[in-house]
């Protein structure tokens, strides 16, 4: 450590000691002058809830698509996979703009990242990653006045997808889509979800993946049977000129087995078909994975 760095460290330590020993100053502003959420009562608090936090708009940030980490079982660890996904509401429903035009609160920014991770190789490289930002509009509730319909809404938007690579391995495309989503009560706590996502390609990269539509098609049909507090089976079906692809996800909450000590789902996934990654979109794959998810 250089002499300058040593003096900086000593100075910081002195400032911390002075701050710790100094008496707490009386607040200068009243409750009417400052918002209650910004005030501090002079008591030391935890780092994850105190005045050092700058997460001012978390109420507009929420989960989006499933979030999971899965180990490759067959053919092996080289086909491990994980996915992260979040969405952000652009207009606060309590703001004056949404108060005058309530439909504005349906606009969202979304981001999903899905990676195939080769955990078998020594350097643990990522085989391919799909980066998927999007802008979409969500109409979460359309009343159908049917006792069997537990939920119904529509989502539509524009999504970009690329693998972030250059040269011959570069892949990218764009989608314009619409997706009606319906929930149907079956029996007990079980519900059926049907969500056909219909999309078209816009400004697809015709140099590296010009025939992507022949392998991914134009419809992603999602069908799921789920108990919100128990087991859930979800399927995705893509029909394309080169053949059909299917993904099955079976999840079960570990809270059922370990009370509330383990807050995640046991997750099994099977994929068979084309287009799971952009890099190998025209290569047929059959993969079984097992792991966990926190959003399903």
Image: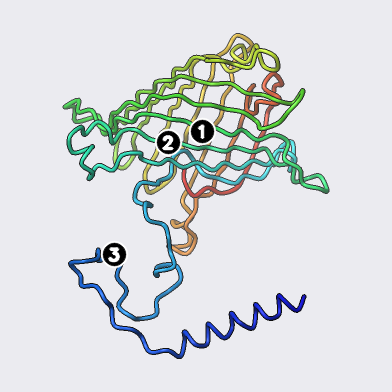
Q: Residue at the spot x=65%, y=77% of the render?
A: 8
Callout in the foreground (3, 1)? 3
- Within 10 Å of the Cα at label 3, are there few (<14), some (14-19), or many (20+) other Cα atoms? few
> Residue lying furthest top in this view?
241
First of labels 3, 1 by sequence position: 3
Residue 270 horizontal side relative to residue 66, left or right: right
Residue 290: % across, % down: 62, 44
Residue 65: % across, % down: 47, 38
Q: Is residue 117 above or below residue 152?
A: below
Q: Are marks 2 and 3 in contact (CB under 8 Å)?
A: no
Secondary element at image label 3: helix
Q: Are marks 1 and 2 in contact (CB under 8 Å)?
A: yes
- Within 10 Å of the Cα at label 2, are there few (<14), some (14-19), or many (20+) other Cα atoms? some
Callout in the foreground (2, 3)? 3
First of labels 2, 3 by sequence position: 3
Q: Which residue is mark 2?
A: 109
Residue 244 horizontal side relative to residue 123, left or right: left
Relative depth, front residue between 89 and 194: 89
> Could you give the CA–CA distance between mark 1 and mark 2, rounded to whole angstroms?
8 Å
> Could you give the CA–CA distance between mark 2 and mark 3, rounded to whole angstroms?
26 Å
Disc ID at residue 133: 1
First of labels 1, 2 by sequence position: 2
Q: Which residue is mark 3?
A: 37
Q: Is residue 135 above or below residue 205?
A: below
Residue 249: % across, % down: 53, 36
Q: Residue at the spot x=65%, y=12% of the render?
A: 206
Residue 86: % across, % down: 46, 42
């Amino acid at each position: 450590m250089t002499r300058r760095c040593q003096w900086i460290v000593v100075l910081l330590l002195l400032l911390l000691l002075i701050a710790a020993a100094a008496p707490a100053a009386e607040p200068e502003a009243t409750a009417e002058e400052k918002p209650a959420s910004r005030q501090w009562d002079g008591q030391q608090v935890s780092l994850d809830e105190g005045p050092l936090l700058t997460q001012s708009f978390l109420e507009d940030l929420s989960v989006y698509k499933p979030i999971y980490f899965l180990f490759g079982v067959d053919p092996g660890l080289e086909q491990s996979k994980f996915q992260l996904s979040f969405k952000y509401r652009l207009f606060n429903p309590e703001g004056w703009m949404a108060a005058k035009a309530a439909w504005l609160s349906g606009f969202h920014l979304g981001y999903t990242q899905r990676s195939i991770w080769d955990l078998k190789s020594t350097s643990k490289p990522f085989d391919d990653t799909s980066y998927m930002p999007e802008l979409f509009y969500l109409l979460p509730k359309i009343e159908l006045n049917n006792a069997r319909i537990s939920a119904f809404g529509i989502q539509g938007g524009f999504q970009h997808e690329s693998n972030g690579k250059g040269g011959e391995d570069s892949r990218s495309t764009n989608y314009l889509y619409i997706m009606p989503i319906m929930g149907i009560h079956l029996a007990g706590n079980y519900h059926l979800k049907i969500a056909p996502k219909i999309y078209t390609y816009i400004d697809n990269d015709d140099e590296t993946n010009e025939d992507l539509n022949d392998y991914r098609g134009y419809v992603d049909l999602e069908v799921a049977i789920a108990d919100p507090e128990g087991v859930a089976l979800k399927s995705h079906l893509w029909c394309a000129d080169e053949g059909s692809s299917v993904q099955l996800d079976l999840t079960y909450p570990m809270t059922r087995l370990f009370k509330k000590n383990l807050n995640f789902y046991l997750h099994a996934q099977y994929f068979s078909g084309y287009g799971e990654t952009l890099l190998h979109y025209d290569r047929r794959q059959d993969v079984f994975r097992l792991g966990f998810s926190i959003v399903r």
